[in-house]
Image (spheres, helix red, strand yellow):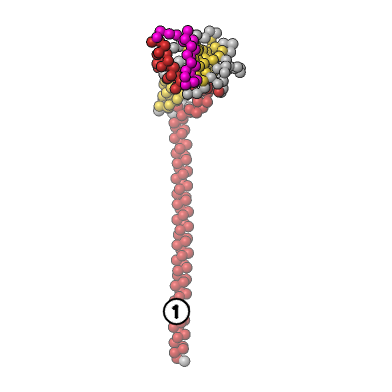
Amino acid sequence: MRNENRFQRNTSKKRIRYNRYYVNVRQNRQSASFRGIVKGLLQIGLLGGVLVGLYFLGVEIYRYVSTDPYFEIKKISIENNISVDDREILDTLGIRTGQNIFSLSIEGCRKQLVCFPNIRDIKIKKRLPDEIFIRVYERTPMFQLYNGAYFYVDKDGYVMAKMSREPDSSLPVVTGLDLPVVDFGTCLSLEPLELVSKAITAYQNNESLARIQIDSIDISDPEKVVFITREGGSITLGSNDFEYRLKKLDKILIDLYNRNLCFASIDLRFENVPVVVK
């Protein structure tokens, strides 16, 4: 009986110690959780204060740079423009001296390029604190089209803001094509004109062919591109492999000139090239 009472007392003491330990652990966890919440709120408040401070600092910096005379445009440099003068470019793009350099939108200026059919691209650089540099990339005419007048067209098929009543002897005239209404700045996305562009590029890349001058290019047959020379000879290229065919033409011309002969027509579409001598 005495042993049982002793056992009960020991068990009660252990239970009391266990309950005290559990309560202490629970209290410590609650205290740590509360401290974590307070610490998190302080960090959020500090971060929010920093962000608000940075916002107002940014507003003040923007207000300063957008109004201070130090950042007013004082010099505008334009280079590489030939067909369009400086004043026309500046008036269209809306760039002027005395304007704040940060108020100038480069992307907005690029959108104004539609006003210049002769300009392919334009690069604008801001040179802080007060200088604007503009480099113009103009389109280069590759051939001419006749539609009541002679229109200049570049390699991409864009009709340039240039025309004349008489053909330009330095550029071939493309014939045999039913044209839509031709207007400056429009892109003639026509497959025959793409072939013409590729054929002329191949011709220009072969420096040995400078001995012949191309007067016109006939594309009335969509399956072939035909060069007509100043002397009236015809060179039929077909519709592909222009570089390879023109290399064959170069060898043929060397042989003809060595024999002091002129050709009436050369057909390069076949492996055995038919040549008609005048």
Please name the residue that numbered disc 1 is placed on: 14
Tell whether position 93 is magenta. no
Q: Quadrant of residue 244?
A: top left
Q: Is residue 69 visible?
A: no
182 relative position to 134: left or right: right
Q: Residue at x 51, y 27 (%)?
A: 108
Chief secondary structure of the magenta span? loop
Q: How many marks?
A: 1
What is the residue that sits farthest to the bottom in this orientation? 1
Along the viewing direction, whichever of 140 and 52 lies nearer the viewer: 140
Quarter location, residue 98: top left
Q: Badge 1: few (under 14), some or many (20 or more) residues near its Cα, within 10 Å?
A: few
Instruction: Please name the residue shown 45% across and 37% down the image.
Output: 58
User: Which portion, as a residue range, is magenta?
Assistant: 259-278
Residue 219 visible from this viewpoint? yes
Above or below, 253 against 106 in this view is above
Q: Position of residue 210 (x, y in %)?
A: 42, 13
Viewer-closest of 175 and 245: 245
Q: Of helix, strand and loop, which one carries label 1?
A: helix
Q: Judge by depth and name the residue closer to the eye, 83 or 33.
A: 83
**Type of amino acid under label 1:** Lys
Residue 258 figure quarter: top left
User: What's the residue at 45%, 58% (across, down)?
Assistant: 36
Residue at the far left: name it.
258
- Residue 180 in the image: state x and y as whole percent: 61, 18
Residue 221's spot in the image, x, y percent? 57, 18
In percent of width and height, residue 215 lies at: 49, 11
Q: Is residue 237 above or below residue 263?
A: below
